Amino acid sequence: MAVQTPPSAVRRRVLGGGRWIPYAFVTPFVLVFLTFMLAPIVIALVNGLYSSQSSGLGFGGAETVFVGLRNYTRALADADFLVSFGRVALYGLVQVPVMMVIAAVMALLFDSALVRARRFFQFAVFLPYAVPGVIAALLWGFFYQPSVSPLVQGLRAIGIDADLLAPGTVLWSVANVSIWSNAGINMIILFSALQSLPRDTFEAARLDGAGELRIALNLKLPMIAPAVLLTTLSTVIGTLQLFNEPQVLQSITPNISSDWTPNMAIYAVSTLGRDPHLGSAMAVILGLVTLVVSLVLVRFTNSSSRGGAR
Amino acid sequence: MDAKVLSRHRVRRWTALLTTGFVAIAGLTACSSGGGGETAAGGAPAEGPVEIDFWGWVPGLEDLVETWNTENPDIQVSFHRMTGDDGQKVEAAVDAGTGPDLVQLSTHDLPDYVINGRVQDITEHVAEHESNYTAQSWASVSFDGRVYGVPQGIGPSGMMYRTDILEEHGIPVPTTWDEYLEAARALQAADPDVYIANLSPGEIGQWVQEVQQAEGSWYGIDGDAWTVGVNDEASMLVAERWQTLLDEGLVTTELMWTPEYWARVNAGDIATISYAAWFPTALAENAADTSGRWRVAAMPTNAGSDNQGDSGGAAVVVLDGAESAAAAAEFASWLNGSDETQEALITEGGLFPSTVNGLDSPALVEEQEFFGGQAINEVFIESAGNTPATWTEGPNWGTAQTAVLDEFAEVVGGSQTFAEALDNAQAATVDDLEARGLTVNE
């Protein structure tokens, strides 16, 4: 009889019957992950080992044959593809620190009591992030073209002849778009981390005579190290994946080639070059490089933060 | 007309990216109607009309499709206007089995589609119409004696020039490339703000028309092997010409179709533009304020030759996976070749016809206000008649074109010469063909 069932048995029955519940909760994630992450990776890995081959003039048709690692050797022998990695590395070396410094300085300013109309400025800094990357590049594209740019014409009026799309400057014009777009979101992440810090620590520091600058640099920044790592990591990965901004700006300047970044090279080979097999191999190489860079960065910061704690 | 596709890609990538959302929606609609089309097309006639899905870019096609649908209840066509990078989606869609039945395609791209089996052999459905097409346009859709598409327009060359600027400085309209160089120097000497031309490092059609004029070809067939001529003798002649103009600072180097480019055209910085018969429509649209100041003459010629060039034609092709090839081909033949459609294709579409009845159409030689009342197509008709039949399309146009344009950017940037650029692009094109298993005779 139900009334005589001991409480423990009831609990056991509920638990037993509910064993599926966690699985139900993770199922949507697992399905999406399998379909849109794992499956494409597996498909790219397999595709990269094949090639579409014809013979003679080719009008007899093409067949897909296994070629082992030949697509990989072709990709690695392509000097322009390798140069594109160098280009994003140079870009990252400048863009990542600039972006992180801007985001951190703004977050610290907003966190201190120094800024008036804080909500307005926070909103203003964050707003560009709400503009899709392609649109942002289009907007800046107008600023970069001399005949239609108030920026270039303004500089000209004060005697500075700036070519923002020249071979030597275009990389930084692209970086500018990306910093304008993404500094805001990084600022918000760092700012929320700052807001969750215990205020009494800073009070104590103030009593000990530390100034706001000292508190910001020696207390606040080290305490939000995990958030800094997170934003740095996503910025670095974003750098390696650079595509939207240069792809859009490519239509207004010849100084961005079709294989200007690794992702653009993959796109060009797969669509214009019509070789998705080679494109897959290149995508796998880019994925591996991204993985290695991320691991190195995490390992490096882990060990340095442990060193700092000691 | 490939140059047109590309130029439109550029211009559209710029303007149409603003409407990315709409494009996405249009794409979705096209996909859903594509699915419906396939199932219906496979059925017996009793089950209802055959449905054909058609992608194209020529202005005014919507109206023509509607006319067809009203007149042909058994074959219903749904049209999707191609924008942005739609052209690059076609292959993936075909391979995935979700492609349209019919698509407008540059004839430069056709061999690659044929080799990879993405288009259907429609010889038996269209052969009866051959006599209505110019020999050259028919040849551009025929491989190994089989026909893979219905020609839709060509791009014979001409030179649009600012009659007011040339007159102001007392410079005669150049008729040869030697005179052109002299005019370029005279113009710069007279007014350092005015240049004879813009050398766009992103506009392959302008390059191709001059290579063709000099009787060169990027590809050739030698027995059972391809030959590649990206750096052939004709190309080197064109390279030398533009190297001189560039080195002497006689040309601007803006990318065509950008706001910057049109600003300079409108400002009167650029005195001549050599391009295909469809370009005047674009010029009138983007430089409306300069109306009445332009005229069209034949593109300057090489010494001892009347040759003109052609930047490329287009065709409507039946894609692999289209279940009702006969119906699709019937519509394509009507669209491109019937007496009913010629005037609309010329006036609305801005096409230069590749059909006999199109070339006879009175609409073709209408006088144009933008060009001071000149019947400009008379120039292009003559140009089409003077285009040498030496150009052969080849199997990796996309790769060759990308390689050439990337290299040209470095020429304009000053880090190499045209001759070096062509040698590099030649090597890249040959490597790519060999990687595909094709035979190349070097």
Image (tube, coloured by chain):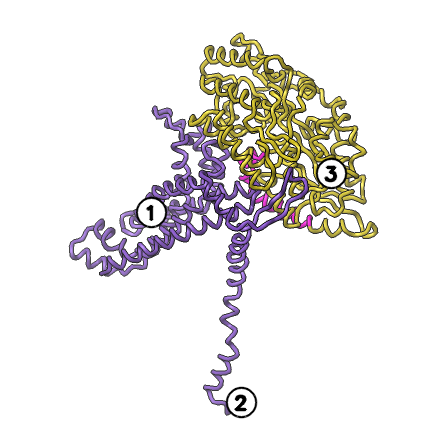
Chain colours: A purple, B yellow
Name the main secondary structure of what is drawn in magenta.
helix
Residue A100's disc number: 1
Residue at mark 2: A2
For label 3, the crowd category at 10 Å Cα-Cα, with few meaning under 14, some 14 to 19 and many 20 or more, is: some
In the rendered image, residue B147, in percent from the top left (x then y), is placed at: 73, 36
Task: Find the magenta span and give its range.
Answer: B7-34
* Residue closer to the observer: B244 or A253: B244
In screen coordinates, is A304 left or right of B73?
left
In the rendered image, residue B145, in percent from the top left (x then y), is placed at: 74, 35
Disc 2: host chain? A
In screen coordinates, is B98 left or right of A176?
right
Q: Secondary structure at mark 2?
A: helix
Disc 1: host chain? A
Alpha carbon distance from label 3 to label 2: 74 Å
- Number of numbered discs visible in the structure rendering: 3
For label 2, the crowd category at 10 Å Cα-Cα, with few meaning under 14, some 14 to 19 and many 20 or more, is: few
Which quadrant would the N terminus of chain B be assigned to in this image?
A: top right
Say which amino acid is labelled 1.
Met
Q: Secondary structure at mark 1?
A: helix
Evaluate if marks 1 and 3 touch, with contact meaning CB atoms under 8 Å apart: no
Single out the mark in the foreground, 2 or 1: 1
Q: Is residue A104 above or below residue B273?
A: below
Q: Secondary structure at mark 3?
A: helix
Q: Is residue B144 visible?
A: yes
Say which amino acid is labelled 3.
Val
Q: Residue furthest left?
A: A208
* Residue closer to the observer: B411 or B229: B229
Q: Is residue A245 visible?
A: no
Residue B65's disc number: 3
Magenta-drawn stretch contains B11: yes
